[in-house]
Amino acid sequence: MSAGRPTTVRAAAKVNLHLGVGAPREDGFHPLDTVYQAVSLYDDVLATAAEESSLELLTADHVDGAGVPLGGDNIIDRAAELLGAHHGRELTTRIHLTKSIPVAGGMAGGSADAAAALVALDRAHDLRTSDHDLLAIAAELGSDVPFALIGGTAQGLGRGELVTPVADNGEWWWVVAPSDGEGLSTPAVYRRFDELRPDAPATPEDPTELLDALATGEPLRLARSLHNDLQEAALDLRPELGDLLDLGERAGALRGIVSGSGPTCVFLCESRAGAMATAEALRAERDVVLLACGPVAGAHVLLDQAGA
Ligand code: ATP
């Protein structure tokens, strides 16, 4: 029997401050040059070693859990398979997943769950996997999963999985407006990107200007250098997002952008007070408006029930 302990691990949503996308590679993936920031919207994964595997989902009021697969197709199931295969054993686990990150919103909620699950499963089954191996398994699970493990602010190359922390001297305040309706499929957004940008360069645009802005900690400079190559495709699929971006900027945000592949829109504000005022104004028009700050930590143990 395992000497592991029931463990709760928390992982954060991400915003892409810069998302440079190149023409598809031979393996079908798009080369990325991106800068991720972890922001304070979180999912929690509680893992307990058990005789049989199960997954129970709890969602915050603003999260529609209908899109989260529970019958063995969850990315958490895949994390358990890969981590188990790495250690040559089956990891039967009772999982409780609590979601606050919008589903299919371009904030990498699934990737956050995968990263949290890797750390929680590792503790629950007392596997003592090295950080190096956890990162390698994370990259196999998905392009955004290594970043969800490390958090903070980091540049991602390759298909986003090759992550390096970058200097970030700001405390950045965001207003987050998830979609009022359905999420957007990431592959569908990339397909539209390919149609709209048949001449995309092989090497994606680099974030030099944005990295300078992060180091200064000045919100206006960061606002000016935010960049998302997928925004045009997301707006083409969901034209109403353009109105939302205008609305947020009229409500006082320094700049609004589509988060990753969308449809969540995020608004960078000058300060906490500025974000609160912008959120308040947006709430007159939108069902769900959230406040978040970044950068925050990557996947971390919240509660180790043996009280380590
Ligand atoms: P990204 O920004 O990485 O493209 P996203 O935020 O747009 O991701 P997710 O919430 O990660 O989207 O979910 C994408 C799809 O993954 C969902 O539509 C769902 O079918 C599937 N999925 C599998 N496991 C999970 C999970 N734990 N949480 C959410 N979705 C999951």
Image: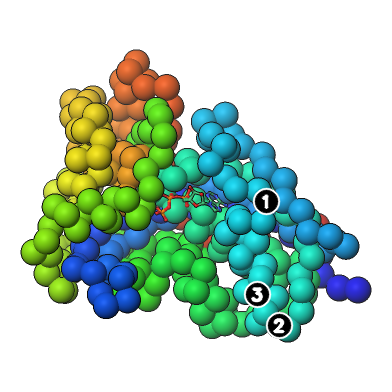
The CA span between labels 2 and 3 is: 7 Å
Decide which of 1, 70 is in the foreground and name it: 70
Identify which amino acid the numbered label 3 is placed on: Leu
Q: Is mark 1 within 8 Å of ligand 1?
A: no
Specify the quadrant of the image occupied by residue 257: top left
Q: Judging from the image, what secondary structure is the residue with disc 2 in?
A: helix
Residue at x-position 53% and y-position 35%? 63
| Crowding at mark 1 (Cα within 10 Å: few <14, some 14-19, many 20+) | few
**According to the image, label 2 marks what residue?**
87
Point out residue 184 in the picture as x, y percentages from the top left corner. Answer: 37, 43
**According to the image, label 1 marks what residue?**
71
Residue at x-position 74% and y-position 58%? 47
Q: Judging from the image, what secondary structure is the residue with disc 1 in?
A: loop
Decide which of 262, 45 is in the foreground and name it: 262
Q: Earlier in the sequence, mark 2 or mark 1?
A: 1
Identify the residue at the far right of this view: 1
Identify the residue at the far left of this view: 199
Point out residue 16 in the picture as x, y percentages from the top left corner. Answer: 31, 55
Decide which of 227, 233 is in the foreground and name it: 233
Q: Is mark 3 within 8 Å of ligand 1?
A: no
Q: Which one is closest to the eye, mark 2 or mark 1?
A: 1
Residue at x-position 32% and y-position 50%? 188
Point out residue 132 in the picture as x, y percentages from the top left corner. Answer: 54, 83
**According to the image, label 3 marks what residue?**
83
Identify which amino acid the numbered label 2 is placed on: His
Q: Quadrant of the N terminus?
A: bottom right
Q: Are marks 2 and 3 in contact (CB under 8 Å)?
A: yes
Identify which amino acid the numbered label 1 is placed on: Gly
